[in-house]
Image (tube, grey):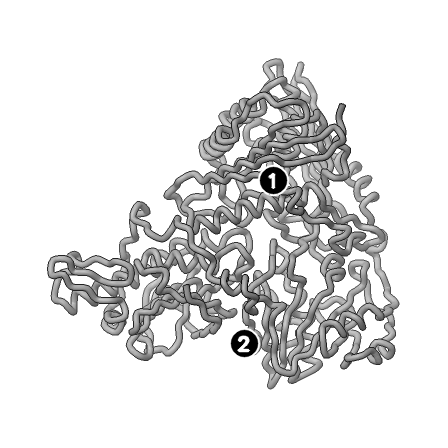
Amino acid sequence: MKHTSDSPSMDRRHFVKVSALAGGGLLIGTHVLFGELAAAESLAPAPADFAPNAFVSISSSGAVSIIAPNSEMGQGVKTSLPMIVAEELDVAWEQVTVTQGDLNPAYGRQTSVGSQSTPANFLPLRRAGATARALLLQAAAQTWGVPVSDCTTETGSVIHRASNRRATYGELAATAASLTLPVNVPLKDPKDFRLLGTRVPGVDNPKIVTGVPLFGIDVQLPGMLYATYTKCPVFGGKVVSANLDVVKARPGVRDAFVLDGVEGLPSGVAIVADSTWNAFSATDKLQVQWNEGAAVTQNSVEMAKHAEQLASATPAPALPSGAKAVQAVYHYPFLAHATLEPQNCTAVFKNGVMEMWAPSQIPAVGQGLVSRGLGIAPKDIVVHITRLGGGFGRRGSNEFSIEVGAIAKRLEGTPVKLMWTREHDFAHDNYRSNGWHYFTAGLDGAGKIVALHDAFVKMQSGPGDMSANGFPFNAIPGSQVSSSKLPGGIPTGFWRAPGDNGNVWATQCFVDELAHAAGRDPLSFTLDLLGRTSYQPGFDAQRMTSVLKLATDRAGWGRQCPRGEGQGFAITRTMGAYVAVVADVVVSQAGELAIKKITAAVDAGTIINLSAAEAQVQGAILDGISAAWFQKITIERGAAAQTNFDEYPMLRMNDSPRLMEVHFVKSNLPPTGLGEPALPAAAPAVCNAVFAATGKRIRTLPIISESLKWS
């Protein structure tokens, strides 16, 4: 598999196009707008490849080049999106060169968020590949004077079996580029897929394991300086004064200055040095007097008290006569993203143009921040997209772009790499919101839920919201979710599987709690609820039932376990995918938790790359377990109390599940995302298994804060 780092671009606005490449090649591109394709238009010969969401060019040598426009952060889109084109094009994967695209309006919506890169691009990319293949078939038929219907393709060649003739795509490229673009080209029947659903290594894998520069943190430019930007530990605070003269006297420091009054840029102190080490060392000596602002009154203890008051203001309706009441409060904390690669960005401002190298999930957001804050037209802000060392939603907000942009503009002509220290990264995250669920349910004499109310309190609006239409609320007539919001001041944002990452834990644990209160097996209890689920757009109870049965069957659900061992499961529909996770755990009498096995069943539609799909499910489950078991951010005096990994531990190898099985439901439905869907069910599956093993119900995360001792 070949890979190049060049990112050519052209300014094109139409959806499907064909043109001749310099040297007699074929150029096909797609542009996605609201998921539809517009009319085609021929273009003048072009020396460079281009495609908004996917693009294929074929040279006269037969080499195929496909641009990957979306940011790659380990979710595999730099490989899977080109695979879709290659499948319909019917080209050998070994012939393909994948190139990371830079930010370009002509590429369409270049965002890697919400697990939508693959679902949004699947059909347009198939059409792009199929259109190119159709042109090559026409070119061969015209060359040989035979009907197109008598020709077929096979791994980069067109074949006319009746005359035993074969022509490579490279040989046909120039002729194909001169043809009229076909419309409504047929797509492959999924049963004929040769590439999709197979295991394909990531295109960057060899470079990653050999340390070839790929990430934002790796960027090196001639004459580059290194910068840090220090903000008030209390969110929203401003600089009053700083010991700039002392800092400037430090070894290797080139400058130190305050930035304030720039739109989109919090007040802070920039330090510029000749190395990262000297910049960090000088930052350690920085002393700032801060105006801490109103957020200094915020703390986690008071938030909990306020949440209880808000929940009390939205009490559950009276239960039906004779119903047994079951009540519980579930709480999850703020979480940091804790990406392995700290936030960073490199920029140089020269001749009125800001050129940036950004590890961003939404590079256009960073471009917009720089444009508004520094008064530079978007056309004069060039953004190169680097590989991301983890994202999980964190790298969508792009604060690093405006920070380095402001520093680079001040040091006009000098490249500057901004590096956040690990402490700054933890202290100035856009955290996963905390949340409280005050559940009240009623069970009738047969052990069925007849009433369900959730007084839900959170700080964040948007991705943390719940809906009464979600499971299990859609199975209980008259169920209600009453949402309340805590006062703001603490920055919150999208964290892997937004909303579901905490809410599914609470609701799935409470469903398990209700099953036990009813004296019923949780599996039969949940299957009964799924059978009662009313219709709602986007929720298919049968698909959910299928993954639940598959996971529990493969996990051997229902077997007798000795005390201290237990099984638990949870289900979720997240980002369009249906997931069931079963956890097998062991808890010693001293309260030491070990996860023996995780079994997951996933219905994510068509699987593009089986290796990447398995990795995403496994990684999401591990991430969900890590957060639920060990992690929390607490707020003290308006600031995060945890500022490094010693206070915010990650899942280690010795705590990871001993065995993980992932089973995919074979499907010809369009693909869903896979970077996030498996995460929400992991934590409740483990917590429910802990209850089965010990009788201890975990209603507050992280698990490590709870005693699991039993006798």
Residue 605 position (above or below residue 525): below
Dot in front, 2 or 1: 1
Q: Residue 526 at x, y = what percent?
A: 55, 26
At mark 2, the secondary structure is helix
In the image shown, does 179 or 216 lie closer to the viewer? Answer: 216
Q: Which residue is mark 1?
A: 657
Contact check, label 2 and label 1, Cβ < 8 Å = no
Indicate the amino acid at tag 1: Pro
- Residue 535 seen in render: no
For the point 37% across and 43% down, which residue is it? 668
Indicate the amino acid at tag 2: Lys
For the point 59% across and 72% down, which residue is it? 357
Q: Which mark is residue 277?
A: none
Q: Residues within 10 Å of mark 1 (few under 14, many from 20)?
A: some
Q: Residue 650 at x, y = what percent?
A: 69, 49
Horizontally, residue 316 falls left or right of residue 12, namely: right
| The C terminus: image quadrant | top right
Residue 337 position (above or below residue 503): below
Q: Which residue is mark 2?
A: 379
- Residue 175 seen in render: yes
| The N terminus: image quadrant | bottom left
Residue 560 position (above or below residue 216): above
Count every numbered label the image shows and give the total.
2
Q: Residue 163 at x, y = what percent?
A: 11, 61
For the point 57% across and 26% down, which residue is it? 477
* Gap in angstroms between the C-alphas marked 2 and 1: 49 Å
In the image shown, does 278 or 391 lie closer to the viewer? Answer: 278
Q: Residue 624 at x, y = what percent?
A: 62, 44
> Dividing the picture into quarters, in which one does residue 248 lie?
bottom right
> Dividing the picture into quarters, in which one does residue 590 lie?
top right
